[in-house]
Image: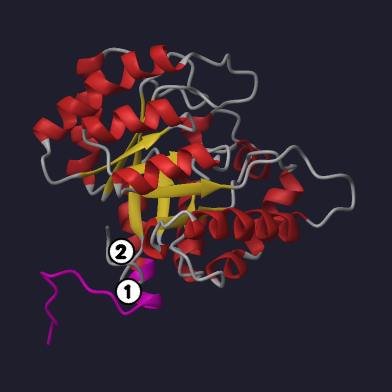
């Protein structure tokens, strides 16, 4: 896995779907592979390949269909980029197993984790991203407390299953099962999630809450708003940001990490 704590890493999104909320889905294998390779060239440290849309109202697909979409892409990207870190965006145990056999080294689950999924992750010796995703809390409920409780319980189960702490990555689930105000409340308390002492991931890219705040109706117009949350994630010392727009995120992370963590690029020289 990556050297957690040294910098914030960029995870590039590769949607192999016809119905992505952000409009960047690519159902053709060659197109998805080329997009993944381009994301890597732009500076993505991780490539997150998914075959099922999780946008509101999206139609669920079977594990067989999901595998048909993503396995050829994972295999082709692994062949093109033998040293790249590949993640599979799925919550289905059978899909996770086949994706890891094809070359994925991380499972990104948007619906928490079942014991069956944890068993597969442990057996395959890969990483697991555990995301908070519940139905909206009742009015007056503390969303931050709910996120912390959920992630603490899930990570404890992962540890008991034998998964190393460094392979358990926690995601507060911005935009999933939360109102816009609850999303903002969770963003304001990212440090509490970092304090759980696991690697962490933030996925705010092009989300609807950013559109409400900025008045940007089209997801593709929310790059600047996403970049603001990327810099904020670095300030909170989160480990990964999951984004559609890798180049913008890479620049934001480079500057923010230089300020927050004292990071410098290998080519850094001090001008006199």
Q: Residue at 16% across / 25% down in the picture?
A: 76
Q: Which mark is residue 254?
A: 2
Q: Quadrant of residue 65?
A: top left
Q: Residues within 10 Å of mark 2 (few under 14, many from 20)?
A: some
Element carrying mark 2: helix
Quarter of the image with the C terminus is bottom left
Check whether the beta carbons of the residues at disc 2 and disc 1 lie within 8 A of each other.
yes
Q: Residue at 42% across / 48% down in the picture?
A: 128
Q: Which mark is residue 258?
A: 1
Q: Residues within 10 Å of mark 1 (few under 14, many from 20)?
A: some
Magenta segment boundaries in residue numbering: 256-272
Element carrying mark 1: helix
The residue most toward the bottom is 272
Picture coordinates of residue 255 (x, y %)? 34, 67
Q: Residue at 26% across / 51% down in the picture?
A: 45
Picture coordinates of residue 51 (x, y %)? 40, 22
Picture coordinates of residue 185 (x, y %)? 71, 58
Task: Calculate the distance from the C-alpha at mark 2 to the C-alpha at mark 1.
Answer: 6 Å
199 left or right of 207?
Answer: left
User: Magenta part mainly helix, strand or loop?
Assistant: loop
In the image, 226 versus 131, the foreground residue is 131
Q: Residue at 31% across / 27% down in the picture?
A: 98
Is residue 268 rendered magenta in the image? yes
Is residue 93 rendered magenta in the image? no
60 left or right of 140?
Answer: left
In the image, 217 versus 64, the foreground residue is 64
Name the colour scheme: secondary structure
222 left or right of 71?
Answer: right
Look at the picture and state if 137 lies above or below 262. above
Q: Quadrant of residue 146?
A: bottom right
């Amino acid at each position: 896995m990556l050297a957690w704590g040294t910098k914030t890493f960029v995870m590039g999104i590769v949607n192999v779907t016809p119905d992505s909320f952000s409009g960047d889905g690519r159902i053709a294998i060659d197109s998805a592979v080329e997009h993944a390779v381009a994301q890597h060239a732009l500076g993505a440290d991780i490539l997150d390949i998914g075959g099922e849309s999780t946008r509101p109202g999206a139609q669920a697909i079977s594990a067989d269909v999901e595998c048909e979409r993503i396995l050829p892409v994972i295999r082709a990207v692994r062949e093109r980029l033998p040293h790249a870190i590949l993640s599979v965006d799925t919550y289905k145990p059978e899909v996770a197993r086949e994706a890891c056999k094809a070359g994925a080294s991380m499972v990104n689950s948007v619906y928490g984790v079942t014991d069956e999924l944890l068993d597969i992750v442990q057996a395959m010796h890969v990483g697991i991203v555990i995301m908070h995703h519940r139905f909206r809390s009742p009015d007056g409920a503390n969303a931050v407390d709910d996120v912390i409780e959920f992630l603490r319980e899930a990570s404890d189960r992962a540890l008991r299953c034998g998964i190393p702490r460094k392979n358990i990555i926690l995601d507060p689930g911005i935009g999933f099962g939360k109102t816009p105000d609850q999303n903002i409340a969770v963003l304001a308390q990212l440090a509490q999630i970092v304090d759980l002492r696991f690697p962490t991931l933030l996925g705010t890219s092009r989300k609807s809450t950013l559109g409400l705040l900025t008045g940007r109706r089209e997801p593709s117009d929310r790059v600047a708003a996403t970049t603001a949350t990327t810099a904020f994630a670095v300030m909170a010392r989160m480990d990964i940001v999951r984004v559609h727009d890798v180049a913008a995120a890479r620049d934001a992370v480079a500057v923010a990490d230089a300020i927050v963590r004292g990071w410098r690029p290998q080519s850094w020289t001090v001008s006199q």
